[in-house]
Amino acid sequence: MREFFTSSPAETEAVAEALAQKLTGGEVIAFRGDLGAGKTCFTRGLARGLGYEGTVNSPTFAIINEYLGGKFDIYHYDMYRVNGWEDLYSTGYFDYKDMGGIIVAEWSENIEGALDDDTIFVEIEKLDETKRKITIRGVE
C-alpha cells in the first residue's frame, strides 16, 4: 500500500502518471472516492502516462469511454448505475477485460464481486477543496 498527498489536479495526475509506468496490460484499476474527489483527474494522468494524447472525460452519461492509441488502450467505466451481474455483462466489461487493455472503474463498489484478487485499488479522499489523500493497493 502506498499513500500520496496532493494539493492540485496536476499533482494528482503526476501520481497517476507514475502508476502508469508500472502497468503491463490487462490490469483493472478500481476507484473508490466521493463525487468530485478526482477520479477522472487521476484517469487523465494515467492516460497521459500511457501515451494517450486525447481528451479524458468522465464516463457518467456514457457508462464507458475508450481511450485508444497509447501504450495500452484504456476502458474508463462509470459503474454507478450498474446494479448486478446482468447490468455488468451489458456494459461489455468481461469482453473488454479479455482485450489486454487497462480497465479503470469508477464506483467500483458496485462491481465488488466481479473484481479479481489482482485488482489495483485507488482510493481518493477529498481532504478539502484542493487537497487529496490517494491510497494505492495492489501494485508495488
Image (cartoon, helix red, strand yellow):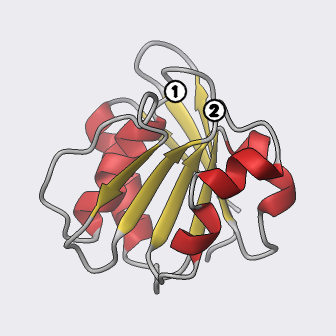
- Asked if one can make out residue 113 in the rendered structure from this viewpoint, the answer is yes
* Residue, disc 2: 33
How many numbered tags mark residues here?
2
Give me the residue at 57% from left, 82% from top. Answer: 98
Give percent across and percent down for residue 97.
58, 74
Q: Choose between 49 and 117: the one closer to the eye.
A: 117
Horizontal side of 69 relative to 66 (left or right) equals: left
Q: Position of residue 9 (x, y in %)?
A: 31, 33
The residue type indicated by label 1 comes to Ala
Q: Looking at the picture, which amino acid does disc 2 mark?
A: Gly
Q: What residue occupies the far left of the structure in this picture?
A: 53
Inspect this view and state whether residue 14 appears: no
- The answer to whether 69 is drawn above or below residue 35 in the figure is below
The image quarter containing residue 40 is top left
Q: Is residue 92 above or below residue 91?
A: below
**Residue 100 percent across, percent down from the top left:** 48, 83
Look at 19% across and 64% down and name the residue there. 52
Q: Quadrant of the N terminus?
A: bottom right
Measured along the vertical axis of the image, is residue 44 above or below residue 81? Answer: below
Rendered image quadrant of residue 11:
top left
Residue 79 horizontal side relative to residue 55, left or right:
right
Q: Secondary structure at mark 2?
A: loop
Disc 1 on helix, strand or loop? loop
Q: Which residue is mark 1?
A: 37
In which quarter of the view is residue 94 placed?
bottom right
Q: Is residue 75 left or right of residue 33?
A: left
Q: Nearer the viewer, residue 78 or 71?
A: 78
Other residues around mark 1 within 10 Å, as few (<14) / some (14–19) / many (≥20)? many
CB atoms at circles 2 and 1 under 8 Å apart? yes
How far apart in space, not on screen, are marks 2 and 1 (Cα)?
6 Å
